Image (tube, rainbow, N blue to C red):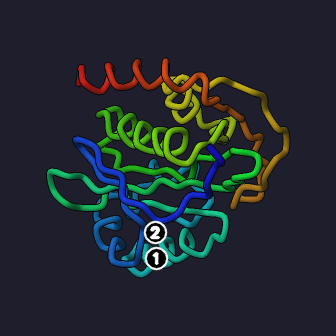
Amino acid sequence: MTAKTPAPVVLTGTRIRLEPLDRSHAADLFAAVGGDEEVWRWIPIPLPRTEQDMLDVVDHYLDGSDSQPFAVIELATGRAVGITCFLDANARDELVEIGGTLYARSLWRTGVNTEAKILLLTHAFEELGMGRVMWKTDHRNERSQAAIRRLGAQYEGTFRRARRRPDGSWRDSVYFSMLADEWPTAKQRLSERLAAG
């Protein structure tokens, strides 16, 4: 199968739905994550302290020509509780990055991230035909690194002095990836973990 570039799509699981992000999600997102410094600690965007700030954040996500952002919708409430994205897709080389992810702190370690990644990885490998999915994160963001490792992604290395943070300091970026032939085993393990609660 020839790989395809991600396009707007709705991906539905048992707890959440991923739908194309738009400005109508801003109010829910502000209620879920606005002003929470811990949620935004590693996101290279100013902390949203008002609904207008959150609209600006949504616009920032939507402005990326190399990004396909999703609102994470909690099925039980119908409310947007986070954001996650496909980034830098390259159909010719069969690769895509997952990033720009944030969730309400109340949903950390609840299975929401696991289900979101199952949905994204299934779409990337099984529907888009990607051969490689990658992640990168700040070397100081140990929580994110642990979450990526729990998915079954492999550590690839650290790019030193990779990006300037908003405060002017330099970030080293830690890279991870999963390949298409690793996905079936990872999918089974993640699905079992999600089913176990």
Instruction: Residue 165 in the image: state x and y as whole percent.
Output: 72, 55
Name the residue tied to disc 1: 53
Q: Amino acid type of disc 2?
A: Pro
The residue under label 1 is which amino acid type?
A: Asp
Q: Residue at x 46, y 39 (%)?
A: 122
Tag 1: Cα neighbours inside 10 Å, few (<14), some, or many (≥20)? some
Q: Which residue is mark 2?
A: 48
In this picture, is 111 found above or below 23?
Answer: above
Give the x, y percent position of residue 155.
69, 24
Query: Residue 188 placed where, x, y %?
Result: 40, 20
Are dots 2 and 1 in contact, CB under 8 Å? yes
* Disc number for residue 171: none
Precedes in sequence: disc 2 or disc 1: 2
Q: How many marks?
A: 2
Q: Tell me: 129 left or right of 106.
A: right
Say whether residue 94 is left or right of residue 180: right
Query: Helix, strand or loop at disc 2?
Result: loop
Q: Which image quadrant: the C terminus?
A: top left
The image shows residue 185, relative to residue 88, as above or below, that is above
Relative to 36, residue 145 above or below: above
Foreground residue, 101 or 129? Answer: 129
Q: CA distance from mark 2 to mark 1?
A: 5 Å
What's the residue at 45%, 51% (across, down)? Answer: 102
Quadrant where the N terminus sits is top right
